[in-house]
Image (spheres, rainbow, N blue to C red):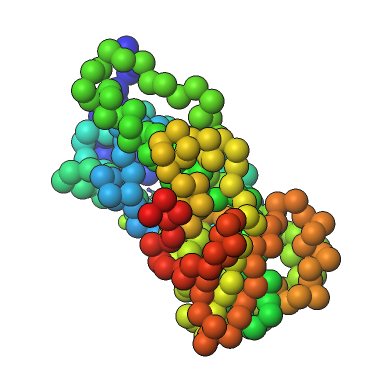
Amino acid sequence: MATRTEIASLGEFGLIDHLTRNNETRQASTLVSVGDDAAVLDPLGKQIVVTTDLLIEGVHFDLVYTPLTHLGYKSIIVNLSDVYAMNATPTQVTMSIGISNRFSVEALEEFYEGVYAACEKYNVDLVGGDTTTSAKGMIISVTAIGEVNAGSFVKRDGAQKGDLICVSGDLGASYLGLLLMEREKKIFLESPGVQPDLENQDYILRRLLKPEARKDIIEFFEEQQIVPTSMMDISDGLSSELLHICKQSHTGCLIYEDKIPIADQTREFAFKLGMDPTACALSGGEDYELLFTLKQEDYEKVTLNEQISVIGYITEAEAGSYIITRSDKKHALTAQGWNAFK
Ligand code: ADP
Ligand code: MG
């Protein structure tokens, strides 16, 4: 059996030292990292973006099927995604955790393995955090800091009539991964002997358990000198996010069902469950893709990037927000999405 070291045997300070003993600094803007009362950062003439997220066991994640390494990784990624959504480059993160004695030192090491893997991959520094006791369940709070050239940040309110609506990657996979995991969990709880049936579902599972943030898209914008007119990341489903952009930009929109990118595996698993893949893309969550609008003159440039799909265009507010289906019908877009089977 694997060894189990009780947190109490290290104490709070011992635990922090243990978890941060190999912590590296990569960013020039990190002057003081973990170990003092506060980190010291020097933005080097850039503007700073800050974002934070709170994750609660039983609400945002389920440790029955979430490996701790993946959870550590994902808790960093969801914050980096928000930084990229501002057209900024993430540079530092802080990690605060609330844990009960149910967790061993080894379990937290696994969690931090994921945290450090994400920091390394995205070139960000872990510069601090807090560690405290939780009566029940695990609580994770991450703050991410990023840098952006003066005036180059992109908000949600800049879309204009005629702008192209674009998304990165593909949508709906993470939601179907969640449905798959919930199904397997139920089967497991009812009959523990049954082996999970996860064959050919690696993509949707990876999208749920180990998502990535779209660093590549922000780098592409920089290379191509593209500045989106508005942008946000897709954490709650395409339709709800698009309605946010329209509301804040005082516009309407028109998107086309057949242009929404959905992976084959996502589509197949949706059909297996008797669900509409488009509805999953519109209303599923946790895709961590970028939704953005561009001036029409940037159209040629985005066709260079296979990871970007143009799904429609911005209209004036009076025109409303609609989706044109494959069968050429026009439906109002709602925050709950739209379901072809209704
Ligand atoms: P304080 O009592 O001032 O809050 P702590 O003892 O909590 O200080 O933290 C000591 C140092 O360790 C600080 O730099 C803090 O940011 C960092 N730290 C605390 N907990 C964590 C953690 N879970 N992960 C990373 N760094 C942490
Ligand atoms: Mg503290």
Q: Position of residue 67 (x, y in %)?
A: 40, 32
Which quadrant would the C terminus be assigned to in this image? bottom left
- Camera-nearest residue between 332 and 173: 332
Task: Tell me which residue sits at (43%, 61%) in the image.
Answer: 337
89 in relation to 70, above or below: below
Q: Position of residue 291 (x, y in %)?
A: 59, 64
- Camera-nearest residue between 261 and 294: 261
Task: Tell me which residue sits at (80%, 75%) in the image.
Answer: 297
Q: Residue furthest left?
A: 135
Displayed quadrant of residue 3:
top left
Which quadrant would the N terminus be assigned to in this image? top left
- Camera-nearest residue between 24 and 279: 279
Q: Is residue 202 visible?
A: yes
Displayed quadrant of residue 255:
bottom right
Q: Position of residue 274 (x, y in %)?
A: 41, 39
64 in relation to 121, above or below: above
Task: Tell me which residue sits at (41%, 51%) in the image.
Answer: 341
230 in relation to 272, above or below: below
Number of on-image labels: 0
321 in relation to 273, above or below: below
The answer to whether residue 68 is left or right of residue 288 is: left
Q: Position of residue 52 (x, y in %)?
A: 42, 63
The answer to whether residue 63 is left or right of residue 47 is: left
Task: Tell me which residue sits at (73%, 59%) in the image.
Answer: 219
Q: Is residue 228 visible?
A: no
